Image (cartoon, rainbow, N blue to C red):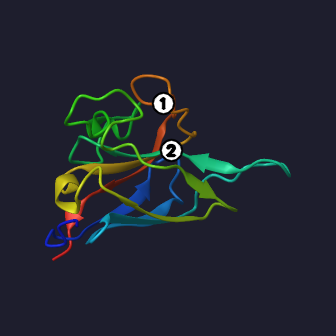
Amino acid sequence: MYNTSYQAASAVITGSEKYPDIRGLAVFVPTELGTMVSVSVYGLPKSEGECQCGVFAMHIHEGMTCTGNAEDPFADVKGHYNPNGCLHPCHKGDMPPLFADNGTAYFAFITTRFTSEDVIGHTIIIHRNFDDLHTQPSGNSGEKIACGEIMPIL
């Protein structure tokens, strides 16, 4: 049985200056089976061609703020949330990818890798590419295109 007394959390997701149309919400809710993570995102880059699909890596990162510099607008998010020092893709912050259709994605899953309280004060990042689940340290998932700061739901 999983502890459901944890506080729920959420993050408002916004795109970088290069991807200003990205908007979304991530919610982290304790359940009896683990933490339910629900993510809805709009304005993701659209893929061209009949057989193309938008697949975007999504991770919890160590940093607390969605700030950075001109070269990397989300540089301050640091690396993946990885309190146990595991190799990728076994970081606690590694999550399944987002599959977008026409720039929109919705995804929900349950995990026991972290509680909602574990990730409060960290950031959620959406990357431009999919995560190859192999390349160290972060799956060769490309530039950070959107970010949200995870806060408690009061």
Residue 1: horizontal and vertical position, in percent? 22, 67
Q: Quadrant of the C terminus?
A: bottom left
Q: Earlier in the sequence, mark 1 or mark 2?
A: 2
Question: Would you say 136 lies left or right of 32 here?
Answer: right
Q: Secondary structure at mark 2?
A: loop
Write the residue at 30% across / 48% down. 66
Q: Tell me the CA gap for discs 1 and 2.
A: 9 Å
Question: Residue 81 falls in which quadrant of the image?
Answer: top left
Using the image, determine if residue 113 lies above or below residue 140: below
For the residue pair 123 and 74, the one nearer the viewer reads as 123
Dot 1 lies on which element? loop
Rendering coords of residue 58 (x, y %): 45, 48
Tell whether label 2 touches label 1 (CB within 8 Å): yes
Disc number placed over residue 115 in the picture, else none: none
Q: Please provide percent x and percent y for residue 4.
A: 19, 72
Q: Residue at x 30, y 43 (%)?
A: 92
In the rendered structure, which amino acid carries the disc numbered 1? Gly
What residue is disc 2 on? 57
Q: Nearer the viewer, residue 104 or 94?
A: 94
List the residue tagged with mark 1.
139
